[in-house]
Image (tube, grey):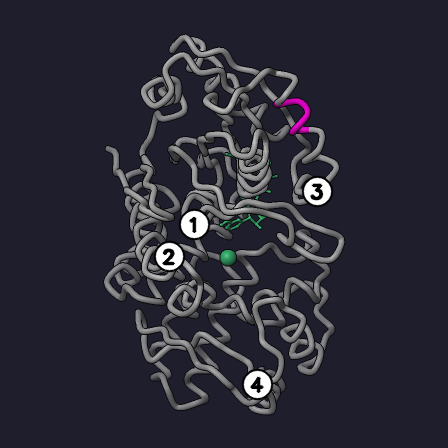
Amino acid sequence: RQEIVRVALGGRSYDIIIGDGLLQRAGDYIAEIAPGAACAIITDENVARLHLPTVEQSLKDAGLRATTIIVPPGEASKSLSVYGRVCDDVLAARIERRDLIVALGGGVVGDLAGFVAASVRRGSRFVQIPTTLLSQVDSSVGGKTGINSRHGKNLIGAFHQPALVLADVDSLRTLPLREFRAGYAEVVKYGLIGDARFFDWLDADSDAVFHSQAEQICAVAVSCETKATIVARDETEQGERALLNFGHTFGHAFERLTGYDSARLVHGEGVAIGMACAARFSVRRGLCAEAAAERVERHLKGVGLPTKIHDIPGWRDDAQAILDAMYQDKKVERGALTFILLRGIGQAFIAKSVDANEVLGFLKDE
Ligand code: NAD
Ligand code: ZN
């Protein structure tokens, strides 16, 4: 089984191929768009151990020359120093503009390798092979690439669209359950913001996506399609794209207050709690039926995701600290807080100028 999602952005388009056995056939797909090209595969140590040999062999079989650049796993690799080293390694491998940079790994590798591709020789072609559920459903659409600065996350970067994305659900078999769940939170988000039938489908058998590859292919395809549609309608990030931030105004604040310590909270867990908070806040404001918010919470809990602020290990911060952290988010405008709220499942909307005291009152009761 295979699904193809065509993404058209910035006047260019590319395919996201979603299926199984794609790592083994990567060479064929790449040779098709860049026959005889040299490839620089950028990956991290974990993914190198698990999946690199398959991809290297496949490129070799397709007659492509490949060099591999391995970085340490984790967010710390989205740094200027690692970026500098990888750029130099790519140039040392004599990768020309028409050659290819291949990002093999999760969102960290995708963002780093994408930014290397955006800047080496003022823009080189790149192929993404996302190996986490999060990177398959989120980073493979939108063309955002970049690294972190000591002043904050993702502050140095560029828009650079890939030439091709290969999302192989086989790679998800080796993904730790906690990472899978974190990516799944973003899958649920796509249902909640605009596709009640998709949420119904997930909710009818919440275990299915965790165990069946056919359901994974379908869930990744619907997620990519939803994100691609929203991003294409709003490339300049003026309006509708904000819907993708559902659960994130709360979630980012929790991540900030836990010091981005992945032992306590990973992004998708913050988003899960954030979505449950946004649903409960919608009920409190009289916008959404209580039963809908309860359903959201039950679903997330059912797959093992946290839904309450106090689910965060060692949580000690108060409502005011959360509000302050929200104001530090680069996506939050001072004074007027903007939230993505729900009128029901699949009916998210942008609520501008939400009163800070109302948020504070809600958070105190959480
Ligand atoms: P990640 O890349 O750090 O991967 C998580 C962990 O899983 C790492 O330890 C990694 O080595 C390991 N791993 C990856 N694939 C594996 C596999 N198949 N089997 C076993 N282990 C595997 O994290 P992530 O959650 O994929 O991505 C998070 C990053 O993505 C953040 O930096 C975030 O800013 C970025 N992001 C970017 C976009 C975008 O649009 N560009 C969107 C969302 C997130
Ligand atoms: Zn997210």
Tell me whether circle 3 and circle 4 mark residues in contact (CB < 8 Å): no
Q: Earlier in the sequence, mark 3 or mark 1?
A: 3
Tell me whether circle 2 and circle 1 mark residues in contact (CB < 8 Å): yes
Q: Is residue 70 above or below residue 173?
A: above
- Residue under pointer 1: 142
* Residues shaded magenta: 86-90
- Residue under pointer 2: 231
Q: Is residue 193 above or below residue 177?
A: below
Q: Earlier in the sequence, mark 4 or mark 2?
A: 2
Furthest residue in direction front, as rendered: 122
Q: Earlier in the sequence, mark 2 or mark 3?
A: 3
- Residue under pointer 4: 359
Image side of residue 102 versus residue 36, left or right = right
Tell me whether circle 1 and circle 4 mark residues in contact (CB < 8 Å): no
The magenta stretch spans residue 87: yes
Q: Any atom of ligand 2 within 8 Å of the CB at mark 4?
A: no
C-alpha separation, residue under disc 2 versus residue under disc 1: 7 Å
C-alpha separation, residue under disc 1 versus residue under disc 4: 30 Å
Q: Is residue 299 above or below residue 2?
A: below
Which is the main secondary structure of the residues drawn in magenta?
A: helix
Image side of residue 32 versus residue 140, left or right = left
Identify which residue, 88 or 262, lies in the foreground: 88
The disc labelled 2 sits on which kind of residue? Val
- Residue under pointer 3: 79
The residue tagged with tag 2: helix, strand or loop? helix
The disc labelled 1 sits on which kind of residue? Gly
> What residue appears at the point 35 percent right and 67 percent down from the top-left corner?
193
Image x and y of residue 89, in percent = 66, 22
**Quadrant of the drawing holding the N terminus:** top left
C-alpha separation, residue under disc 3 versus residue under disc 4: 34 Å
Residue 224 appearing in the image: yes
